[in-house]
Amino acid sequence: MKFFIHADGGARGNPGLAGAGAIIRDEFGNAVASVSQFLGTHTNNFAEYEAVILGLEALTKLVQKKKLNVIEVVVNMDSELVVKQMLGVYKVKHPVLKEQQARLVQVASTFGTVSFTHVPRDENSDADALANAAMDRGA
């Protein structure tokens, strides 16, 4: 079984009012779940990590822990920083982002495979809309 998560986070001001959004699609491209959550005051990079964590947690609930270890997940996001940090290309230096990365690694470890792909912003519009809706709710 394969799922695709488009995730995005943002902050109005940096740090500022932050939100995270993620949409989960099955292997046929059907949207099966989404997340849009206001995060309070954080940086955009914190919100980017949180969006992926929330997306993976939503997927865990969706499949109800049935054979998570055989599920392949492709995470698509427009945050080059998070993608390259998760691929080990960039080091994570900021203490808060180290915590976020550790949380993400923990959640991701329950799945068979989780891969990260950088996509252009215009290919991430659904997740961006969910993140912006979350920030609007917090304003």
Image (cartoon, helix red, strand yellow):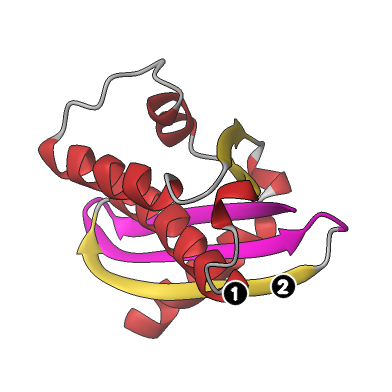
The amino acid sitting under disc 2 is Val
Camera-nearest residue between 103 and 125: 103
Q: Tell me what residue is drawn at x 75 percent, y 53 percent.
A: 1
Chain part drawn in magenta: 1-28
Q: Quadrant of the C terminus?
A: bottom left
Among all residues in the image, which is located at the extreme top?
A: 89
Residue 103 is left or right of residue 36, and the answer is left
Q: Secondary structure at mark 2?
A: strand
Q: Which of the 4 quarters of the picture holds residue 67?
A: bottom right
The amino acid sitting under disc 1 is Leu
Residue 9 is left or right of residue 69, and the answer is left
Q: Main secondary structure of the magenta part?
A: strand
Distance between the Cα atoms at labels 2 and 1? Answer: 8 Å
Q: Which residue is mark 2?
A: 32
Among all residues in the image, which is located at the extreme front?
A: 67
Task: Decide whether residue 64 is among the magenta residues.
Answer: no
| Location of residue 114 in the rendering, given as x and y in whole percent from the top left corner | 55, 40
Of badges 2 and 1, nearer the viewer stands 1
| Location of residue 100 in the rendering, given as x and y in whole percent from the top left corner | 26, 47
| Cβ atoms at labels 2 and 1 below 8 Å apart | yes
Q: Which residue is mark 1?
A: 62
The answer to whether residue 139 shows anywhere in this view is: no
Q: Tell me what residue is drawn at x 59 percent, y 74 percent.
A: 62
Residue 44 — which label?
none
